[in-house]
Image: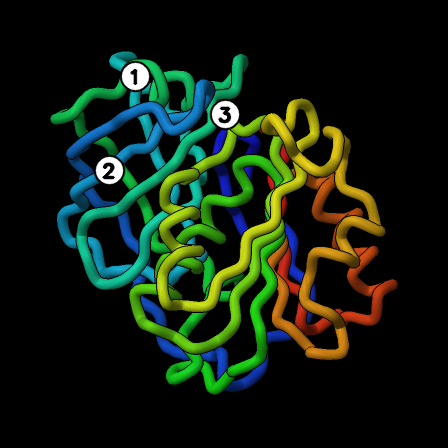
Amino acid sequence: MSADGTAPPVATTGVPPSSALRAVPRAGWHVATVAATRRETPNAARIELDVDGWPGNAAGQHLDVRLTAPDGYTATRSYSIASSGPSTRVVLAVDKLPDGEVSPFLVDALQAGDQLEVHGPLGAFFVWRPAAESGEDRPVQLIAGGSGVVPLYAMAQAHADRGDPTPFRLLYSVRTPDDVYFADEWRALAEASAPLELDYVYTRRAPDGWSTPPARITREALESAVVPASERPRVFVCGSTGFVERVADWLVELGHEPRSIRTERYGGT
């Protein structure tokens, strides 16, 4: 995943069990029409696409977006998908990079009715499937830094939609309350019947009355917030390269099985 919402499978940890190996929809290029777009955070937009011929996608997958200039120049970037299932309505949440080629257009200029080229769905390892399909009923720990929460939101929403009984927990490191992606949806998911616990770490400004001052996540904070290693959770970590590497190292130090930790990271491309 790139800092503007990209999620190529550039970093993974562990080996997928045989139960996770399954046929996935064949990726291809599709024409997508913008159905709606709105601000998600001060620096990000939520974009809903109607994708002709979209085969559906699993929670956690991503796609490529290709823009073509009048002179024929093309730019392609990968973005996490915030939705899942068989629908041809695909939801993205894109963070704007000041020097980006694609994200400023998607966030600031894209309008309903515009058309894009998209390629996907992509990625078969950093995905969550219901226990009934995967045979995995262990607890799930989601850990996100910034816009890395996008594919994890797709997992949590799919978990709720399917009524899956697997315990789910999210640890979300974010700058300020205004920078939380899907803030209303997270609250609704936490209040729904599906088991979901939320933990936030604010790095620059915390809400009034928050119990801890703003700070980067620490090993101690991680240990106190995640499902204990003794419960053998499946862990999905997504964020910047530094965030992901630091968190993955701490998880292993805390006794989590490396093969149970799946990671995706983004860089400044």
Rendering quarter of residue 76: top left
Q: Position of residue 80 (x, y in %)?
A: 43, 45
Depth check: give the residue in front, 99 or 36: 36
Question: Which amino acid does the dot numbered 1 rest on?
Answer: Ala
| Cα separation between marks 2 and 1 | 22 Å
The relative height of residue 250 versus residue 77 in the rendered view (above or below) is below
Count neighbours of disc 3 (C-alpha within 10 A) and say few if under 14, some if 14 to 19, many if 20 or more.
some
Residue at coordinates 76% horizontally, 78% vertically from top-left?
230
Check disc 3 and report the residue beneath it: 178
Q: Position of residue 255 (x, y in %)?
A: 83, 71
Q: Which mark is residue 48?
A: 2
Count neighbours of disc 2 (C-alpha within 10 A) and say few if under 14, some if 14 to 19, many if 20 or more.
many
Secondary structure category for the residue under label 2: strand
Can you tell which of label 2 and label 1 is closer to the viewer? 2
Question: Which amino acid does the dot numbered 3 rest on?
Answer: Asp
Residue at coordinates 73% horizontally, 29% vertically from top-left?
214
The relative height of residue 249 versus residue 265 in the rendered view (above or below) is below
Residue at coordinates 70% horizontally, 38% vertically from top-left?
211
Secondary structure category for the residue under label 3: helix
Question: Which amino acid does the dot numbered 2 rest on?
Answer: Glu
Check disc 1 and report the residue beneath it: 69
Can you tell which of label 1 and label 3 is closer to the viewer? 3
The relative height of residue 109 versus residue 258 in the rendered view (above or below) is above
Give the number of marks: 3
The quadrant of the image that shows the C terminus is: top right
| Cα separation between marks 1 and 3 | 33 Å
Mark earlier in primary sequence (1, 3): 1
Mark earlier in primary sequence (3, 2): 2
Can you tell which of label 3 and label 2 is closer to the viewer? 3
Rendering quarter of residue 212: top right
Mark earlier in primary sequence (2, 1): 2
